[in-house]
Amino acid sequence: MRSPAARYGIVGASIKFVNPSVLRLIDRWKVLGDDGLRIKRKRRIKQALPYLGMKTDLSETLFHENGVCPLRESAACVSSTVLFRSMQTFNKNQMTNLHATLRFGRSLLGTVAAILLVAPVLNAGEIWPGFRGPTADGHADDTGLPVTWSEAENIAWKTPIHGLGWSCPSIWGERIWVTTANEEGTELSYLILDRDSGQILRDEVLFTVAHPRFRHKFNTYASPTPFLEADRAYLSWGSYGLACVDSDTYDVLWVRRDLECDDYRGPGASPVIYGDTLYSIYDGFDYQFVIALDKWTGDTIWRTDRPADFHTDNGDQKKAYATPIVIDAAGRRQLICPTSKGAFSYDADTGQEIWRINYSGFSGSCRPLYEQGRVIITAGFNAAEVFSIDPSGRGDVTDSHIVWRSTKSIPSKPSPLFIDGLLYLFEDKGIATCLDAMTGESIWRERLGGNYTSSPVYADGRIFVFNEEGDATVLKPGREPDIVARNKLDDGCLASPVVADGALFVRTRTHLYRIDASTVVR
């Protein structure tokens, strides 16, 4: 009889299935609280709360108007940075304190995921857990980032990454996780690098594929970005395989290779963890569906098929690549899932459709935003548009709940960025646009040059955006275009940059860089 690893097509890894348990749950979801803890970014925590399975509107009960949290016993008051960076391995010696407060935490936050912990926390800026960062919108709280760099300036290290992959690096503490694949798509791998030195700590072929399908030259077999927790990594190569790996032992805790759809032109959507659930979108050439899995076991909680009528028989126009977001809006927990020819909101707990809008674009890959009570969605190729949507509707809300739409210089691949009431868009052909996020009014438009696939990030009061030719532009946000610096690397980016530990981590076609205040290439 074949081993579990052989049955799943896994190379060089052991299988260990772990059933959910209260202690394991407690180990991963902690919130740090203290009497008089000041919250500097109230909006950021309200965005972050849903990703820990907490209700957004609950945050209103946790603050005085001056941003001070008095609820020491609840241990539920955190800045968004501390919130995500406090998910450390549980100290078993503190079991007595935990049991004493467990019931109170459950009743206050309405979820077993919200529990007191006084274990040590990661330092500020030490995680970027998945695509678009800790709050799923490209923002980071890090400061001290350089604005200029080159191959000889402000490069702390530069490490070759074998194969092809447009997945972004994901960071937890001192380790960076990156997925890749060989050019043929027969070997799907992950690498772990040391954050400080760039040294490769592990290079593992996780899946083998006998007959990979066609992929477009602008995509790879390793485009979905990993999602990390304190001691788990969720790694996806689309329909070719999804796995949960123990980040300490490297045991494979569970695997799904039965989520069949034809990832024609290659996979794209990244997995998302929200509370105890993993969400992912599979919009293939043949089948299109959204799925929710138990993150502990990999078992299916629900699966919802996309509507059969896409107003086209062309499977390529049914394909999409977008990563979902989870929001609390209109009294409901909504999973926002763009696809080809439309975008959908599903009940995050049941998969039941709440609302939809229709459009003519297809193959969308931008991750949505939820800002100022509006959902921001871009439509993809063919007819690139950006929509601002009131998420309070039900059914087809195309004619009733689209607040505004814009059609000029809209990106098909780079995700939008929201900063202080303004929406920044970086069109695929190099035009940067700034819109008023509430009205859709055009504020300014500036040609940057080059071709863009990767998404921008915002940190230290500046926007960082990289193109496919190796050029990077640093801008200061505002109602006038303000280019701070232009920089150059040897090769270009299709993966989006990430921010952690006061540095930029940039994956080009061939290397992973750490860009910071260092002056010597290691």
Image: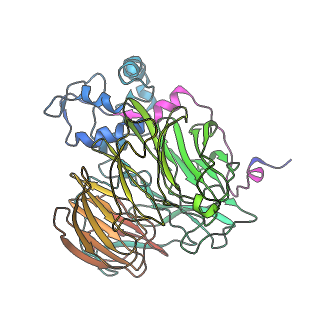
Quadrant in the rendering for residue 408: bottom left
Nearer-the-camera pick, 330 or 101? 330
Residue 91, visible in the rendered structure:
yes
Q: Identify the residue shown where x is 31% and y is 28%.
A: 58
Q: Position of residue 503 (x, y in %)?
A: 31, 63
Q: Position of residue 234 (x, y in %)?
A: 55, 49
Quadrant in the rendering for residue 19: top right
Q: Identify the residue shown where x is 62% and y is 69%.
A: 215
Residue 213, placed above or below residue 294: below
Q: Is residue 396 magenta?
A: no
Residue 120, visible in the rendered structure:
no
What is the magenta range?
Answer: 5-31
**Total label count?**
0
Q: Identify the residue shown where x is 40% and y is 27%.
A: 94
Q: Position of residue 278 (x, y in %)?
A: 53, 42
Q: Quadrant of the C terminus?
A: bottom left
Q: Position of residue 248 (x, y in %)?
A: 53, 47
